[in-house]
Every structure is written in structure tokens, then in C-alpha cells.
């Protein structure tokens, strides 16, 4: 019987459990066996596993997070860990692995595939910045949470004639900020791809005031550059070299107050965007991705990942998703400006 390992790596997101459930249920259909690797690549290094079967995936389609746990462990950082990972693969007698993750997890999957390991990828990230797929699951839920927050900020901002800055996630790409900002009717949206021009921000606020709108809502992605630089919570980097971003909202609010004299406050949405129950769209996408991933394993199409193209789930080379980040097209941002102010 074919034995398939399943792991979830990187930042968690709503929709991981629907993928895990779909992989297990499809494996039953295909007479294959599944085993859960816990805590991302760390579980494969240290041989930490859990059974995956009807019972363990029952009642999880509506649950956020991942029953397997996750980590940002990079096995390629230490050759000894890479050896241990290869040993665990042998010990567990894995025929294939379904690796569910974003650019880092799939980057490791690409390297291991090139070394001959049978891996199928499933793209995940709330940031939606993976190339090759129209959407990643988790994004829709995060956008809806951020949009609802923007709706709520409107009423309190108006009552107090304040400027409210909503800081949303998005390390390198402004997809969450743009989608939630447009859907929530934000007055200004600032993204990592386009340097912030304070003069433009102030101009929009001024024009609104002239129109009798004495409050404004600004949505800013955590990776947006303030005075040319990213704003960091700390310089320490994780296994994949990522710093911890945070503080752009506060920096922006202080500057706006200084320049306009109007009171500005900040709401940092942070991990609220990543927690809780997945939307129907993310449950569907996760389910379709999981089903297709096992189908690819059965077909022996390794080194590939599942991707959404239009309304089809198709296999693409994992490398296609990881070689280049999918950032916001400048034309799309220009279009969004129609709704600023
Ligand atoms: O990559 C997804 C993401 O949610 C980013 O938007 C964010 O910068 C990062 O993860 C936060 O990661 P962590 O939870 O490890 O701090």
C-alpha cells in the first residue's frame, strides 16, 4: 500500500485542515495510507508523527490552523538535520510526501525533489504572493477578516473625526491590503510594492476634509516602506532569513498627526487575520487542492504542485511558484487609486 506523509510548514492559515482532510479522504479512495508529520520539516527531522485517518480528520473542515502544527524550520540550514530528515524518510518508509506551505516550505520541497524525493506541493499563504496559482487558500478568509475590521473602523473614525490606520499582513505583496481596502472602501491603501509618498497621503486627507469628510481610513500593508525602509519589530531573522515586520501603522499615524494636526490612531490586525474558521471559498479550494495532490501522487507527478488556474486545478512545477514572488501589478494599483479619497 502506498504510504503518503503530509506536513504543513510556515505560517499557518485558514484552510490547512480542509486540505489535510481532503488528502486523507482521497487516500482512502485510492487505497493509500497517510501519516501526519508534525511541526513542518521539524517533524521529518525528528520523526514526530501522528496517525491520519477518518477519526483524526473528522470535524476539522471548519477549524482554523493545522492539526499537524507548523514551524519555520529549514532543514537545509544544517547538513546534520538534512541527514536526519533523510533517515526519517527511510524509517517511515514513505513513498511520497504532500508538503503544504508557502514560498519557504515549497522551496525546501523543490530542493528535495531535485534530490529524488517524491514530493507534491500544495500552495498556502494568506499573502497570496505565490506565482503560478491564481489564489492561495487562506487569502480569502484573511481579506474578509480585514474588510470587516475596516467596516468597524469607519464608524468609530467618523464619530471622533479621526484618521484610523489599519495595518494588515503582507510582507512583500499588498494583495490583502488592496483587496480588503477596496472592498472596505478605504480612503488610501499603501502597499510594499509602491513607496509611500507622504505628500499624496496628506493631499487625500485634505481633499476629504474640504468635502466635509472629517475622518479617513488608511490601510497599510506591514511591508510598506516608510521613508524608504521597512519598519521592523526586531532585526533577528528566522531560519529562512525573514525579519519580523511591524510598526509601519504607528510610524505613519505619528507622521500624519505631525503634518495634518489631526488625531490619528492605529489598529494592527496581525494574527487575527490568520486565525479562526476558513471561509467557504478557502474550504472549497483547500478540499480541491488536497484531492488533486493525492491524484498527482497516484500519477507519479512529483516535483509538481497543485494550482488554481481560472476554475481548474492543474499541476505545475513547484519551482514555477517559488522562483518569483507574485506582487501587485502597478496597473492594478493605479486602478485602485480611482477609489482613494
Ligand atoms: O507569510 C505569511 C505571514 O502571515 C506574513 O504576512 C507575515 O509577515 C508573517 O507570516 C508573520 O509570520 P509569524 O507568524 O511567523 O510572525
Image (tube, rainbow, N blue to C red):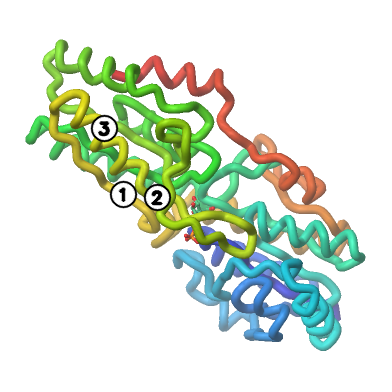
Is residue 292 something one can see in this rendering? no
Q: In front here: 35 or 173?
A: 173
Residue most toward the right?
116
Residue under the point 40% across and 54% down: 233
Element assignment for label 2: loop
Element assignment for label 3: helix
Instruction: Please give the residue where the numbered disc 1 appears in the rendered image.
Output: 268
Which comes sooner in the sequence, label 2 or label 1? 2
Give the class, few, some or many, for how many residues have Cα within 10 Å of label 1's Cα (few <14, many ≥20): some
Residue 90 location (% of width, % of height): 86, 83
With respect to residue 283, does 156 lie above or below?
Answer: above
Q: In front here: 6 or 34?
A: 6
Task: Give yes or no for contact between labels 2 and 1 (Cβ–Cβ under 8 Å).
Answer: yes
With respect to residue 175, does 305 lie above or below?
Answer: below
Residue under the point 76% across and 67% down: 76
With respect to residue 296, does 182 lie above or below?
Answer: above
Q: Residue 255 carries which label?
A: 3
Task: Give yes or no for contact between labels 2 and 3 (Cβ–Cβ under 8 Å).
Answer: no
> Could you give the CA–CA distance between mark 2 and mark 3, rounded to whole angstroms?
16 Å
Q: Residue 246 carries which label?
A: 2
Residue 288 location (% of width, % of height): 65, 54
Residue under the point 71% across and 86% down: 47
Which comes sooner in the sequence, label 2 or label 3? 2
Amino acid at each position: 500500500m502506498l504510504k503518503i506523509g503530509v506536513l504543513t510548514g510556515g505560517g499557518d492559515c485558514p484552510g490547512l485542515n480542509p486540505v489535510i482532510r481532503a488528502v486523507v479522504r482521497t487516500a482512502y479512495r485510492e487505497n493509500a495510507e497517510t501519516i501526519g508529520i508534525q511541526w513542518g520539516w521539524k517533524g521529518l527531522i525528528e520523526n514526530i508523527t501522528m496517525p491520519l485517518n477518518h477519526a483524526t480528520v473528522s470535524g476539522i473542515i471548519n477549524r482554523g490552523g493545522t492539526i499537524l502544527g507548523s514551524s519555520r524550520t529549514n532543514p537545509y540550514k544544517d547538513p546534520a538535520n538534512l541527514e536526519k530528515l533523510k533517515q526519517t524518510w527511510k524509517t517511515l518508509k514513505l513513498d511520497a510526501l504532500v508538503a503544504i506551505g508557502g514560498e519557504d516550505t515549497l522551496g525546501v520541497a523543490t530542493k528535495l525533489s531535485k534530490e529524488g524525493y517524491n514530493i507534491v506541493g500544495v500552495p498556502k499563504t494568506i499573502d497570496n504572493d505565490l506565482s503560478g496559482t491564481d489564489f492561495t487558500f487562506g487569502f480569502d478568509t484573511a481579506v474578509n477578516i480585514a474588510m470587516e475590521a475596516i467596516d468597524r473602523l469607519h464608524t468609530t473614525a467618523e464619530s471622533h473625526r479621526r484618521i484610523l490606520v489599519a495595518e494588515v499582513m503582507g510582507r512583500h505583496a499588498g494583495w490583502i491590503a488592496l483587496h480588503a481596502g477596496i472592498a472596505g472602501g478605504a480612503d488610501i491603501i499603501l502597499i510594499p510594492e509602491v513607496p509611500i509618498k507622504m505628500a499624496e497621503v496628506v493631499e487625500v486627507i485634505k481633499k476629504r476634509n474640504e468635502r466635509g469628510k472629517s475622518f479617513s481610513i488608511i490601510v497599510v500593508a506591514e511591508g510598506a516602506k516608510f521613508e524608504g525602509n521597512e519598519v521592523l519589530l526586531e532585526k533577528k531573522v528566522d531560519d529562512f532569513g525573514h525579519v519580523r515586520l511591524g510598526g509601519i501603522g504607528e510610524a505613519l499615524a505619528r507622521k500624519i498627526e505631525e503634518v495634518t494636526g489631526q488625531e490619528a490612531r492605529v489598529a494592527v490586525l496581525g494574527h487575527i487575520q490568520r486565525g479562526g474558521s476558513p471561509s467557504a471559498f478557502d474550504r472549497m479550494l483547500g478540499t480541491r487542492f488536497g484531492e488533486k495532490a493525492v491524484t498527482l501522487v497516484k500519477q507519479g507527478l512529483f516535483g509538481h504542485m497543485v494550482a488554481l488556474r481560472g476554475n481548474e486545478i492543474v499541476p505545475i512545477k513547484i519551482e514555477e511558484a517559488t522562483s518569483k514572488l507574485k506582487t501587485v501589478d502597478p496597473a492594478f494599483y493605479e486602478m485602485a487609486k480611482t477609489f482613494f479619497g
